[in-house]
Image: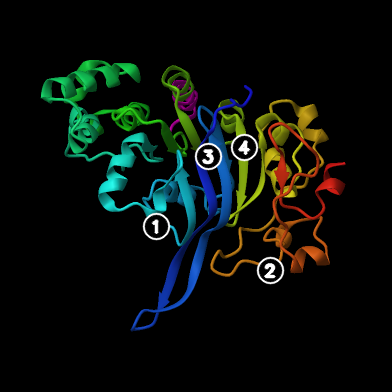
Amino acid sequence: MSAPAGHPLVEVRGLRTHFPVRRGLLLREVGAVRAVDGVSFSIREGETLGLVGESGSGKSTTGRTLLRLERATDGQVLFDGTDLTALRAAELRRARRDMQMIFQDPYASLDPRMRVGGAVREPLDVHGIGDPAERNARVTELLERVGLEADFARRYPHELSGGQRQRVGIARALATGPRFVVADEPISALDVSIQAQIVNLLSELKEDLGLTYLFIAHDLAMVHYISDRVAVMYLGRLVEVGGRDDVFDRPLHPYTRALISAIPTPDPDVESARRTPPLEGDVPDPAAPPSGCRFHTRCPFATELCTREEPKLREPTPADPPHQVACHHAETISS
């Protein structure tokens, strides 16, 4: 799957999302959790950018900040040239018709007191799309589009399986006819037997409707299947960005190499031939990240330079699409 050549639909420039840490009786601010700390990337129209990393790396916060579900501390998010971070409430509501989100937990994201039809119809009501008859017809169309029968509209979320609930969540996200969808770990809460069905559905919808995705996940096998490009995130920063095949076949950052080496394989010969050591330790505290390269505390290739100087995203060798890495020793590691 080659990356499409559309123009940049989403451009993220120096994005920061920090959450204050408050302590004491007066709840004074004593620091901040740097969930997203200076991230820049773009997503071209019609492509899927996979965003991967361990839990706590800032992936979900990045996706939520893109849609203004979290307020950015600094930076810009441009959607088709419009800076979303500068929009007022009424302007943002209009813009959200073109941007929707599929949430990780398909049960928690649905109101248990609302029937499926009401959940899918709600975005149409909020944005005043169509008359009542047209909205009901649209609900039926959307349910059938995601593989559910029309009579599912009368059911409640607790009557559905996890996969069916996620299909409802996808139908709701498509209700307003968006151009850009943030899929925030949409399969992680589902049974393994259902995950492939949901990923295939998302791929079909992308092709049929011309959607653009930010696909957030920690399942690298699924990211490899659905993505055109891949961005690897660690402790609030991007450490590698490139075409899917470039990143998986020729990872330049030691963190990316460790993640890929952890993908299970049924071939014992391939498993025994792996030489990349597994990651040790946990992600450091995002309220007090390490100096220099944030990965140096867990990196087997770290030097004194890594402890004092933070590497910038750069392109060691020309590639199409560009393959960037934030590592002082990328050339040595990848050789």
On screen, 12 above or below 161? Answer: below
Mark 3: few, some, or many residues within 10 Å (few <14, many ≥20)?
many
Whichever of labels 1 and 4 marks the residue nearer the N terminus, that label is 1
Range of residues picked out in magenta: 190-201
Q: Which of pointers 4 and 3 indicates the residue nearer the eye?
A: 4
> Where's residue 204, x and y in %?
46, 18
Circle 1 residue: 71
Say which mark, if any, is on residue 291.
2
Q: Is mark 4 on a helix, strand or loop?
A: strand
Q: Which badge, 1 or 2, is on the more N-terminal residue?
A: 1
Residue depicted at 69% across the width and 44% down the height: 256
In the current view of this chain or complex, which residue is farthest to the bottom? 25
Instruction: Write down the residue under mark 4.
Output: 230
For residue 191: magenta? Answer: yes
- Label 2 sits on a secondary structure element that is loop
Q: Main secondary structure of the magenta part?
A: helix
Name the residue type under label 4: Val
Front position in the image: 97 or 187: 97
Please tell me whether mark 3 sits on a helix, a strand or a loop. Answer: loop
Task: Check disc 1 and give the amino acid type.
Answer: Arg
The residue that mark 3 highlights is: 217
Q: Which of marks 1 and 2 is in front?
A: 1
Q: How far apart are marks 4 and 3 (CA)?
A: 11 Å
Name the residue type under label 3: Ala
N-term-proximal mark, 4 vs 2: 4
Q: Where is residue 285 in the image (x, y as percent from the top left)?
A: 57, 65
Q: How crowded is mark 1: few (under 14 residues within 10 Å), some or many (20 or more)?
A: some
Most distant residue in the front direction: 81
Q: Which residue is depicted at the point 52% across and 48% down? A: 12
Mark 2 is on which residue type? Ser
Where the N terminus falls, by quadrant?
Answer: top right
